[in-house]
Amino acid sequence: MSSTTDTTRPRDPSGPPEEIPPGRSRHGVRALLVRLHFYAGVFVAPFLLVAALTGLAYTFTPQIDQLLYGDQLRVEEVGDRVVPLSEQIAAARAAHPGGTLASVVTPPGPKDTTRVVLSLPELGEKQRTVFVDPYTAQVKGELTTWFGSTPATTWLDDLHRNLHLGDFGRLYSEIAASWLWVIAAGGLVLWIGRSRGRRAASARGVLLPDRKARGVRRTRGFHAATGVWLALGLFFLSATGLTWSQYAGERFGQVLDAAKGRAPELDARLPDAPAPTPEAGGDEDAAHAGHDMSGQAPEVDPADFDTAVETARKAGLGGTVTLTPPADAASGWVVAQSDNVWPVHYDVVAVDTEQAEVTSHVRWADYPVLAKLTKLGVQGHMGVLFGIANQILLALIALGLTLVTVWGYRMWWQRRPTRDDRSTRLGKAPARGTWRQLPLPVLVLGVPAVAALGWALPLLGVTLAAFLAVDMAVGLVRRLRAS
């Protein structure tokens, strides 16, 4: 990673010094990986540690919500008959007449409340959610929510995504996601190569640490073996986290557009509605749910909620559904399904309540493969896929990443020279000048590949360029001092 000619190869402190073989060879690839893994671990690991700890906290949000808001979220006694949605909505509006009725979410389970969501100007992008007992129509309470999330979940979500620092804070999580797979892949290659050379070339040598080892070798064993077990999970979290990141997410969206991998959009316009005009915002997106074509939303009859949900059920939408009133007089009701139990279903329909018929249907089965993978990846990253099993898996990965990071810093500490004439506070960095030992084909193919990677993951490219710049500056200063 530098233009200097220092050829001292990174070595085990307990072994004799090794030299990088002169000329270009495969040893240069390993030496470069060692140096990249070291510097990425030292400088990016704090971001990973914060992401792991905040993600670990977010994993338990369903339990936290039940602990803090159980009185609103749960019913005291399950009844024999569910009250019509219109009566539940009427009860919610009687208790909270202010605002506009935005949507209604049916109970996820028999012990859960119905959620009546109200939009209020003073709340901005947040909303007021009123919780109603579906068996008695009794209002259980209300909370200020953000896209359906409770205040506690919203707070932990912001902590994980941006440390409550807004767009600037999102840089931390994107740097962590951008480098996570690089560190994991590099460490995996280094450990497998080392295990083949020093221990029996077996699965045991890769998957389990050598418990007889001591000092830095023991720490390295736990660090690397745990990383192997976590590798697939870390790759998954990195990839899914990047899909909705600030800069890499934009690149990912461009790839989806080029590959026609976007989820199909629901056309909520009623069949007999006039075609939208440019003055009414008649672009392609205006024909879909959530866009106002006429500027005026019609008055909502609570009884239409019953018709909309009944019609959607007949169309095959089971489980929890979210009902959204028409955005304007030319649009139908939108009913979206959220079924996270295998096999998952995320169908969406537009309903004409006057005719009690479905006018448009977007089926989960019709999603492109990329759209399905993106949706499932996001749901899995958030811990809402397949229930408690998803939560446990995410918690184990977050805890494992925390341990791997701590062990990495411990190795750095253990590798420091301790002799009286060489005492330092931290371990010595791996050798510089490793890029000079790279095989020419690797160098020729690697440079454009890294450039392409830097385009796809802008923060990875920027931070890697910063590493190189600092590394070259340090090398230049040392050469000037030595001359």
Image (spheres, rainbow, N blue to C red):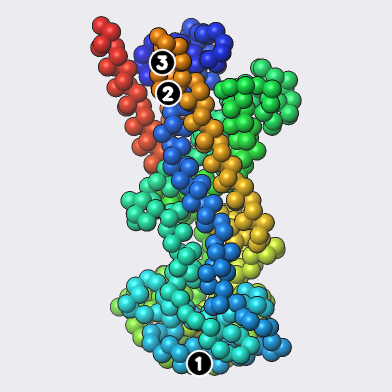
Q: Do the residues labelled 1 and 2 touch (CB within 8 Å)?
A: no
The label nearer to you, 1 versus 2, is 2
In this view, the residue farthest toward the front is 420
Front in this rendered view, residue 99 or 159: 159
Looking at the picture, which amino acid does disc 3 mark?
Ser
Report which residue position mark 2 lands on: 426
The answer to which of marks 1 and 2 sits earlier in the sequence is: 1
Figure check: 15 above or below 44: above
Report which residue position mark 1 lands on: 90
| Residue found at x 50% / y 74% | 267
| Residue found at x 49% / y 68% | 149
Across and down, in percent, residue 216 comes to 56, 23
The label nearer to you, 1 versus 3, is 3
Looking at the picture, which amino acid does disc 2 mark?
Leu
Q: Can residue 421 be seen in the rendering of this structure?
A: yes
Report which residue position mark 3 lands on: 423
Figure check: 412 above or below 108: above
Figure check: 247 above or below 376: above
Q: What element carries label 3?
A: loop
The answer to which of marks 1 and 3 sits earlier in the sequence is: 1
For the residues labelled 1 and 3, the Cα–Cα distance comes to: 75 Å
The quadrant of the image that shows the C terminus is top left
Q: In which quarter of the image is residue 108?
A: bottom right
Asked whether, in this view, residue 115 is left or right of residue 387, the answer is left
Asked whether, in this view, residue 73 is left or right of residue 438, the answer is right
Across and down, in percent, residue 184 comes to 55, 35
Residue density around tag 1, few if under 14, some if 14–19, many if 20 or more, within 10 Å: some
Looking at the picture, which amino acid does disc 1 mark?
Ala
For the residues labelled 3 and 2, the Cα–Cα distance comes to: 9 Å
Q: Is mark 1 on a helix, strand or loop?
A: helix
